[in-house]
Image: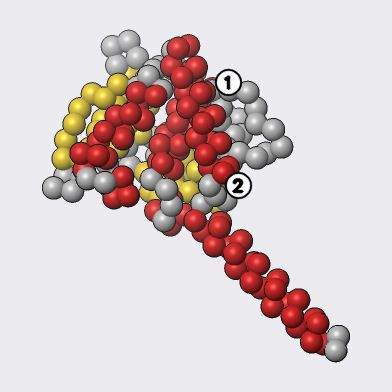
Amino acid sequence: MHRNETSQADPPREQHGEVPGLKICGPNGGAYIVGKTMHLSCAWGNLGHLTPTFSLGKTDRVMHIERFHPTSLVLENSPYLGRWMLYEICAFAARELPQVTVLHFALSRPLDSLGTPSDQVLARLAALDRIGAEATRFGSKGDAMHVIEGVWRPSPANVKKLADALANDRAELRLTPMKSVREASALGAVLRNRLSNVRRFLAG
């Protein structure tokens, strides 16, 4: 069993809980156990789940990340959430799963707000490059979606790149909360204003 905590690849810890680090746990909120489903969440709510698989190569223990089931919180928000979650999963593996020497992943969810499929491919390649990951295969599913497979190895140099990328992405998320969080905050302000008006009316 592994510790159930916010994953980090040894970056400096954020102050005052300002940055919404990702929480990875197993079913029913317990600690994640290899071979079971990973449940992802953050301070803003449930993000989705995936079930990594594991295999043995000639020299490596590989963790495969392929099909992620996102919640509406992810689908309705910035396309960069997927990048941030991938980085957080890599950090979790580097910290909590030392037996894993390679992470293999397939990225395919359409990101229309990033432009054309070619634009989306370039954005994903840039995201992989930031953490020292390598693209290993390209494919397509129809005209509108491309699949990129890649691998990331938790070497000291790559862990350092990952820590830097995570610090930047967490800072961006702190400055730009998720859409549903902003909407909930705005709704709360409206309700508080209405309650204040009712109180003034009742007070005469």
Residue 177 drawn at (x, y percent): 54, 49
Quarter of the image where one finds residue 197: bottom right
Q: Can residue 63 be seen?
A: yes
193 lies above or below 73: below
What residue is shown at x 29% (from left), y 16% (from top)? 57
| Amino acid type, mark 2 | Ala
Look at the numbered disc 1 and give the secondary structure of its residue. loop
Residue 158 drawn at (x, y percent): 43, 16
Q: How is the protein colored in the picture? A: secondary structure
Q: Residues within 10 Å of mark 2 (few under 14, many from 20)?
A: few
What residue is shown at x 54% (from left), y 36% (from top)? 170
Q: Can residue 71 be seen?
A: no
Task: From the image, tell me which residue sits under label 2.
Answer: 43
Please tell me which residue lies in front, 56 or 96. 96
What residue is shown at x 35% (from left), y 34% (from top)? 65
Please tell me which residue lies in front, 91 or 59. 91
Q: Earlier in the sequence, mark 1 or mark 2?
A: 1
Instruction: Report whether 100 appears left or right of 107.
Output: right
| Amino acid type, mark 1 | Asp
Residue 167 drawn at (x, y percent): 54, 29
167 lies above or below 67: above
Q: Disc 1 and disc 2: Cα gap in Å?
A: 20 Å
Residue sitting at the far right: 203
Instruction: Report whether 74 appears left or right of 107.
Output: right
Task: From the image, tell me which residue sits under label 1.
Answer: 10
Quarter of the image that includes the N terminus: top right
Quarter of the image where one finds residue 190: bottom right
Q: Residues within 10 Å of mark 1 (few under 14, many from 20)?
A: some
